[in-house]
Amino acid sequence: MSHLRPALLTDHYELTMVSAALRDGTADRRCTFEVFSRRLPAGRRYGVVAGTGRLIDMVREFRFAPEEVEFLLRTGVVDEPAARWLADYRFTGDIDGYAEGELFFPGSPILTISGGFAECVVLETLVLSVLNHDCAVAAAAARMVTAARGRALIEMGSRRAHEEAAVAAARAAYLAGFRFTSNLAAGQRYGIPTAGTAAHAFTLLHDDERTAFASQVATLGRDTTLLVDTYDIRQGIRNAIEVAGPQLRAVRIDSGDLAVIAHQSRELLDSLGATETKIIVSGDLDEYAIAALAAEPVDMYGAGTAVVTGSGAPTASLVYKLVEVDGRPVVKRSENKATIGGRKVAVRRHKPTGTATEEVVVSQGVPDRQANDRLLQHSYVVDGEPVDLPGIEQSREHLRQCLISIPWEGLKLSAGDPAIPVTVVPAG
């Protein structure tokens, strides 16, 4: 779970609404909020739900410490009644949503939060902060996994993100199918396999490349990866095999024309008898660069900046909107930002072969179920208490199956329509 206190993510305007609602008597009106996206990022054909497990942990911990309440009161953010309410805050409502690893599309109600108005509205920034980040990373990572065509990927972008975002990004990338992360905090918190090698600094530290390689092999054995592009790549490979022998696990290349260099490196390794030594490439890789290397003898990709920043889409563009008050649907009618009122229930429709064809979302009702429909929403929190949630390995497998189920056009990296259409049936 996050080391950042969840309540500190509350936005000023949320507490303005809490204060006013407490004063006018509407704070406890039963409300339903939904999280959804009006559109996918340009060029994307699906989104990936990620971060819900982290979010539920944070909701469970969501409390205002005495010093936080004192600060809010002293600075005039809240009045006395609101300060007393915050001091006793505990979420007592319900949270339902799509499973982690589920695909989503414009209009998919991926999270539903129900309870008193005040206790729900105060969670808005927390919910959107977690889901917008994790879903963006997971969608980018899933595209990279598809582009890699079964070859392994390692997430190595911690230096390109906020320290807490780096851990969350490693989790989201692993959920999306990455094999490893270099982030040790993610390994400790979430049980994600970790991997890594030395940087160029280690080679430069030593008087020559062979000495650096010998030190690394002496410490870690031949089951390590040697970075061979500090100086001359071909000589670096020769030095690596001379020091470690043909049993060296892998070499990593972090610069140059990777397509050409990978091919030449494979030929050189084979000529040196290192036929089982793997080639790992890194260096500003995104899904397009990975796809361009599909025909080259690359065994593993290292992705950093692109994956932790959503590969050009750093947010999933999710919104948190009030859709129901005391059982009555409410709607926003602003141009280009209109919403459909009422609590939604969603199913994914499939052919008998398992291919997804449509998502049907019904407001204030239940879709007419067909033989191959799959209900998309599950309970996460009931009366304030979290229920059993799937583990990250189960969520990983769920996404893998979801990607298999969509039409093959939905996996293309080129721009196009969402992989499957969403039909929203309004209330009444």
Image (spheres, grey):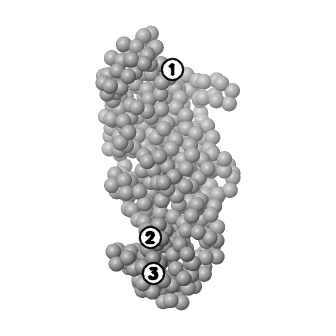
Residue denoted by label 2: 205
Figure check: 87 above or below 403: above
Figure check: 67 above or below 292: above
The image's mark for residue 328 is 1
Q: Where is residue 375 shown, x and y percent of the image?
A: 47, 43
- Residue drawn at x 69%, y 27% is 335
Label 2 to label 1: alpha-carbon separation: 68 Å
CA neighbours of label 3 inside 10 A, class few (<14), some (14 to 19), many (20+):
some
Q: Quadrant of the N terminus?
A: top left
CA neighbours of label 1 inside 10 A, class few (<14), some (14 to 19), many (20+):
some
Figure check: 193 above or below 22: below
Label 3 to label 1: alpha-carbon separation: 73 Å
Secondary structure under tag 2 reads: helix
- Residue drawn at x 34%, y 51% is 189
Disc number lying in front (2 or 1): 2
Identified by mark 2, the residue type is: Leu
Residue 299 seen in render: no
For this orientation, the residue located farthest to the front is: 207
| Number of residue marks | 3
Confirm or deny contact between disc 2 and disc 1 (CB under 8 A): no
Residue denoted by label 3: 210
Secondary structure under tag 1 reads: strand
Q: Nearer the viewer, residue 327 or 34?
A: 34
Label 2 to label 3: alpha-carbon separation: 12 Å
Secondary structure under tag 3 reads: helix
- Residue drawn at x 57%, y 85% is 267
